[in-house]
Amino acid sequence: MSYKASNSQILRVWQMLEGKPFGKWMVSRVLCFFVPYFNSIKPVFTLIQPGQVEAKVEKRRAILNHIKSVHAIAMCNAAELVAGTCMDVSLSSDFRWIPVGMEVRYVKIAKTDLHAVCKLDSYSWDEPQDVVMPVSVYDLNGDEVLEAKITMRISHKRETASGDPAAQVLS
């Protein structure tokens, strides 16, 4: 089996809207509509392409902790968002994915808006496996405030009796 380019809907929407006024914001809202949990951090994607996804998260009261810095779980949400989106837009269309683990290291207190980045060196997986997605979250000074390694399990898409892929049906 060989790599077949992703058929990600979010990638297609991004390619249509990224250069339009409010396009990046609209793509972010579309994703949060389908995955409402991520709306808690109100992300705005700044880059979506196979192998790399980036998003900004504004420091605001709703995601602050008791010392008025960005809460650790809000940073984890941003990390999971960019890792999942990166997997979705990078993975061969013959495969599906699901997160199965997350390892985080809080590097520094997050006192500003944030920028989450997931970047892969290679993404042409051709067999089922667990893949570690590296994510860094930076503050406005460019300092890393969170490092995450999110493990995604990739497997072949199931097929129905008619031979049609049953998209994202878990084993």
Image: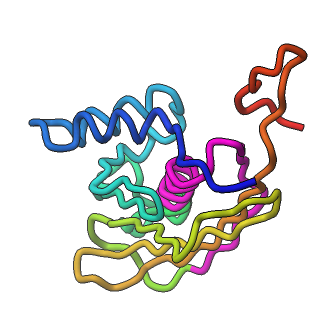
Q: Nearer the viewer, residue 134 or 73?
A: 134
Q: Residue 154 appears at what percent x and percent y? A: 76, 53
Residue positioned 14% across, 43% down in the render: 19
Specify whether residue 78 is painted magenta.
yes
Q: Is residue 95 left or right of residue 59?
A: right
Q: Nearer the viewer, residue 78 or 14?
A: 14
Residue positioned 82% across, 21% down in the render: 163
Q: Is residue 24 left or right of residue 12?
A: left
Q: Residue 31 appears at what percent x and percent y? A: 43, 34
Specify whether residue 169 is painted magenta.
no
Q: Is residue 105 left or right of residue 143?
A: right
Tell me the quadrant of the picture where the C terminus can be found. top right
The answer to whether residue 117 is above or below residue 153 is below
Residue positioned 62% across, 42% down in the render: 93
Residue positioned 29% across, 58% down in the render: 59
The answer to whether residue 20 is above or below residue 159 is below
Residue that lies at the very extreme toward the top in this rendered image = 162
Residue that lies at the very extreme toward the left in this rendered image = 21
Q: Residue 105 appears at what percent x and percent y? A: 60, 80
Question: What span is in magenta?
Answer: 77-105
The answer to whether residue 56 is above or below residue 34 is below
Chosen colour scheme: rainbow
Q: Is residue 43 left or right of residue 37?
A: left
Q: Residue 145 sits in which quadrant?
A: bottom left
Give the mark count: 0
Q: Residue 38 appears at what percent x and percent y? A: 49, 41
Q: Nearer the viewer, residue 123 or 145?
A: 123
